[in-house]
């Protein structure tokens, strides 16, 4: 598939799948390589024939939607965000929850891919927060639309290179070597619940103190879908809760009550609640 054909395919797909064409600028080659392999497997002779098939085959459109999901993940991706959460933002959230008599930190990792993000939160909580808040336990829901990625997440075994941004002492505590892979130790899996969900269609029940929705909705979804997803995310946050998006993402028209949690550059927002200024 040529680059021109790739762009034609994405222009066709974007309005039909609720996607944002601009979000694929850096990754369209990767997506179209996947689609080319799919066309070869189907015996489709070219893009024109594949588009005809897509028009009349809802199941194949669902396959294309899955092929458009691009995953780049590693532990403590965007390390500065995790440092910010651990050093100041989450301690403040936990202190407020403690004052209200709470003892559970509820977190949702939306679009968790193969699990690096939720396990990063587990490491951050147990190694960085639990010593200061020993009465708290972690309740973390991790969702993704890709069943194969979720299976890898549940297995919890990774190449050593994906751990490079974790503090060395933390990785030694949380992971055990199994052949060439490093696997999450059982104690660090406690409180994690992996669920197959597409956040355009289903979301777990809140409320959550922290929602991480990074490099999915606000990169690849079309603006109307982004606005709907954002409203649903905020509905699941406690007042004072935190929403983390991707470092290069922007929110569509942040509503009243949603404010920057740590300066204009940090991709972390605080939900004050509906009707708040």
Image (tube, grey):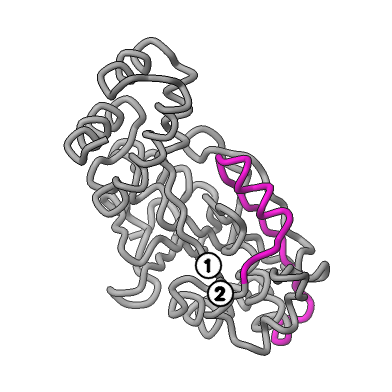
The residue sitting at 74% across, 68% down in the picture is 184
Give the spatial CA distance, label 2 vs label 1.
8 Å
Say which quarter of the image contains residue 48: top left
Horizontal placement of 9 versus 210: left or right? Answer: left
Residue 218: image x %, image y %? 35, 50
Residue 174: image x %, image y %? 73, 77
The residue at the far right in this view is 186
Q: Is residue 87 above or below residue 181?
A: below
Say which quarter of the image contains residue 52: top left
Residue 263: image x %, image y %? 32, 77
Which residue is more in the foreground, 212 or 239? 212
Which residue is more in the foreground, 175 or 127? 175
- The magenta segment is 131-159
Of callouts 2 and 1, the N-terminal one: 1
The residue sitting at 50% across, 59% down in the picture is 212
Horizontal placement of 194 versus 116: left or right? Answer: right
Q: Secondary structure at mark 1?
A: loop
The crowd level at tag 2 (other Cα within 10 Å; few <14, some 14-19, many 20+) is few
Contact between labelled residues 1 and 2, with CB atoms less than 8 Å apart? yes
The verdict on residue 118 being magenta is no
Which residue is more in the foreground, 100 or 192? 192
The residue at the far bottom in this view is 169
Q: Which residue was labeled with disc 1?
A: 74
């Amino acid at each position: 598939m040529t680059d021109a054909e790739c762009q034609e395919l994405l222009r066709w797909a974007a309005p039909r799948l609720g996607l944002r064409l601009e979000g694929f600028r850096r990754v369209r080659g990767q997506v179209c390589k996947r689609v080319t392999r799919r066309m070869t497997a189907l015996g489709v002779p070219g893009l024109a024939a594949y588009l005809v098939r897509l028009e009349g085959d809802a199941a194949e459109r669902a396959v294309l939607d899955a092929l458009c999901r691009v995953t780049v993940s590693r532990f403590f991706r965007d390390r500065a965000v995790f440092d910010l959460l651990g050093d100041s933002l989450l301690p403040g959230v936990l202190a407020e929850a403690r004052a209200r008599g709470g003892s559970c930190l509820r977190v949702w990792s939306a679009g968790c891919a193969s699990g690096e993000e939720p396990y990063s939160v587990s490491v951050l909580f147990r190694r960085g927060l639990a010593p200061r808040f020993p009465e708290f336990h972690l309740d973390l829901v991790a969702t993704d639309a890709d069943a194969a990625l979720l299976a890898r997440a549940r297995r919890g075994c990774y190449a050593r290179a994906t751990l490079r941004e974790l503090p060395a002492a933390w990785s030694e505590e949380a992971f055990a070597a199994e052949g060439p892979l490093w696997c999450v130790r059982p104690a660090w899996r406690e409180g994690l619940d992996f669920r197959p969900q597409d956040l355009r269609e289903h979301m777990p029940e809140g409320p959550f103190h922290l929602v991480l929705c990074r490099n999915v909705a606000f990169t690849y979804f079309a603006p109307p879908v982004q606005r709907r997803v954002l409203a649903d995310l905020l509905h699941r946050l406690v007042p004072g809760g935190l929403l983390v998006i991707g470092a290069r993402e922007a929110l569509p028209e942040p509503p009243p009550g949603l404010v920057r949690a740590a300066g204009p550059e940090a991709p972390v927002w605080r939900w004050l609640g509906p009707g708040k200024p």
